[in-house]
Image (cartoon, rainbow, N blue to C red):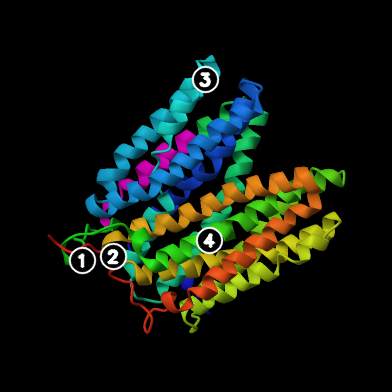
Amino acid sequence: MRNPYSEIFQAPGTKGFAAAAFIARLPIAMAPIGIVAMLSQTHGEYWLAGAVSATYALVNAFLSPQISRLVDRLGQSRVAVPTTLVSVLSFATLIAAANQHWPVWTLFLSALLAAAMPSIPALVRARWTEIFRNRPELNTAFAFESAADELVYVAGASLSVGLSAALFPEAGMLVSTLLLALGSAAFLLQRSTEPPVRPAEHGAAGSAIRLRPVQIITFALIFVGATFATTEVTTVAITKELGQPEAASIVIGVYALGSFVLGIIVGALNLKAPLQRQLAIAVAVIALTTLPLLFADTVPTLALAVFVSGVAISPTFITAFGLIERHVPAAMLTEGVTWVTTGIGIGMALGSFAAGWVVDTFGPQNGFFVSVAAGAIALAAVLAGQCRLATKDCDVDRGEAVMPAE
């Protein structure tokens, strides 16, 4: 029986850069929660831990597209090597500042500089695109990467918190920093698969975010990101109210499992429907499956509802990145992918905040109303943008990000 995943790894160099990228991206999940776990223990103040972690996350969300834009212009190695070095040294300084109780401003400054970490998911997807551009194998490669992202978010966060709790406060951040350094080095040293730098179309380029399809997809995925962040926060609150707080990790794991399984299946299929229609169907499933969450009042029913609500997340990401590849000129692909991942991160931050406020104000079960609202907004955005997301008849924006040569 044909295995499409084994086929994509027959291309030279793919096994090496995919393995290195998986290690290098673990800090994406480990660092934010690792900062909270570290500082809450060393300083005993959750507001400080949350503020430093938020500084890192928000600055990284702002910087990542700019760094990726430089990558498109200058190449992965020329940009990612110095920015990764800055990030690693800054994380090391943050660990030392926490351990030695340096002034609070050193914590914030270190977190701010550590945000220079480049977007490994964007870099690795750019390599897959270079190998399989305009071929069906690219969909399988994107599916593999979406599954890898799911594993990173589940395993990375658990590993970071577990190390800090079991060993010493700085353990999670120390391992995260080492993985960033070693994984990034292994990834960037593989120069044979690094995409070449392409001149911008028509002689000059603006930003990928000026492209209408990138705006639509990024906006929609902000609210998709909010749905699963809300689900995680509300799950923790509900299981605690039910007197089974230890069940939260199991339920959240089931949530990721649903997304992982369907993502792998979708990646193995060669679906014929237009990508914009596939995206609309996936987001519609996300929106509809938030409704049963409102009625889950026991741990088993919560786990079942959460599993169902997670099945369409990976397919949504797979089709979203596929559309980015179709609409964004090759000279700015890394930046285009990064805007989408940035949108997901912003959505997770906003969703966590909104769900936390609703849970505190109206009770745990009502947190899922944020998921319902976010899912509806995401679906409305994708449906309204169907014509703009089409790859043929309505693809009138391909050159919007390109500035005329002077």
x%, y% of residue 387? 44, 79
Separation of disc 2 and disc 3 at Cα? 43 Å
Do we see residue 238 in this rendering?
yes
Q: Which amino acid, mark 1?
A: Glu
Q: Which mark is drawn over residue 330? A: 2
* Left/right of residue 105 with respect to residue 333 in the rendered view: right
- Magenta span: 176-192
Nearer the camera: disc 1 or disc 2: 1
Residue labelled with disc 3 = 104
Q: CA distance from mark 4 to mark 2?
A: 22 Å
Residue 12 image position (x, y, % from top left): 32, 62
Quadrant containing the C terminus is bottom left
Query: Residue shown at 58%/56% (left/top)?
Result: 225
Q: Is residue 179 magenta?
A: yes
Viewer-nearest of labels 2 and 3?
Answer: 3
Q: Earlier in the sequence, mark 2 or mark 3?
A: 3
Residue type at tag 2:
Ala
Cα gap from disc 1 to disc 2, whole angstroms: 9 Å
Q: Which residue is mark 4?
A: 221
Please report the residue visible at 65 percent of the width from the left and 24 percent of the height from the top: 45
Identify which residue is drawn at 51% across, 30% down.
174
Identify the secondary structure beneath mark 4: helix
Q: Mark 3: few, some, or many residues within 10 Å (few <14, many ≥20)?
A: few
Cα separation, mark 4 vs mark 3, equals 34 Å
Tags 4 and 1 in contact by the CB under 8 Å rule?
A: no
Q: Is residue 167 left or right of residue 3?
A: right
Q: Is residue 126 magenta?
A: no
Q: Residues within 10 Å of mark 4 (few under 14, many from 20)?
A: many
Ranked by sequence position, the earlier of labels 4 and 1 is 1
* Residue labelled with disc 1: 201
Residue 161 found in image quarter:
top right
Q: Secondary structure at mark 2?
A: helix
